[in-house]
Amino acid sequence: MEDYEYGIIYFVYDVSDNVFNRSYIGVAKDLNSLPELKEGFEYSEEGLFALTKEGSDIFDKWHDDVSCGYDLCFGRMKGICQTIGGTNRCLWDYLTKRDYLSKRITK
């Protein structure tokens, strides 16, 4: 089994009838540590991506900044979220569309 030093990211869609969208990005150490999904969730068909060092750093920084929420005084998100956006989908697109941040490992 190949070792992915900075982790593997995957996108999980909420396919339930729930009012709230509970889709999210997950991180695993390797292919064997991908979780079994609960009912109402499906893995994205876009595949799995191995993070690079820079991608891992951005992933961590984004989560730190997004946890601060929306700044009502200045009318914007904090830090890197201003560039990437404040949703998991925005982060996923940012990381997976730049080959210096992640590499596709499955389709």
Image (cartoon, rainbow, N blue to C red):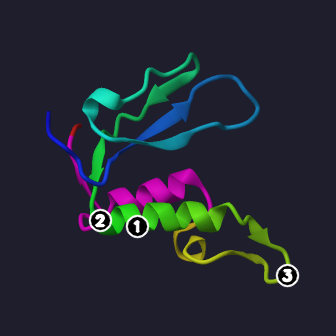
Instruction: Answer whether residue 40 is magenta in the image.
Output: no
Q: Which residue is mark 2?
A: 53
Secondary structure beneath label 2 = helix
Occupied quadrant, residue 45: top left
Residue at the far top: name it: 39
**Residue 80 percent location from the top left of the image:** 54, 75
Residue 56 percent across, percent down from the top left: 37, 61
Mark drawn on residue 57: 1
Q: Which residue lies at the image location 72% right of the left edge and 76% below the top edge? A: 76
Q: Amino acid at mark 3?
A: Cys
- Tell which tag, 1 or 3, sits nearer the viewer: 1
Question: Outermost residue, left direction?
Answer: 1
Mark pair 1, 3: CA separation? 27 Å
Q: Say what amino acid the circle numbered 1 marks.
A: Asp
Query: From the viewer's perspective, is residue 57 above or below residue 22?
Result: below
Q: Give the magenta-colored segment's residue range.
A: 86-105
**Earlier-in-chain disc, 2 versus 3:** 2
Q: Nearer the viewer, residue 15 or 1?
A: 1
Badge 3 is on which residue? 73
Q: Quadrant of residue 48?
A: top left
Residue 3 image point, x, y percent = 19, 43
Residue ID at (20%, 43%): 105
Q: Are marks 1 and 2 in contact (CB under 8 Å)?
A: yes
User: Within 10 Å of the Cα at label 3, are there few (<14), some (14-19), or many (20+) other Cα atoms?
Assistant: few
Q: Residue at x 32, y 48 (%)?
A: 7
Q: Is residue 74 above or below residue 37?
A: below
Left or right placement of residue 66 versus residue 6 in this view: right
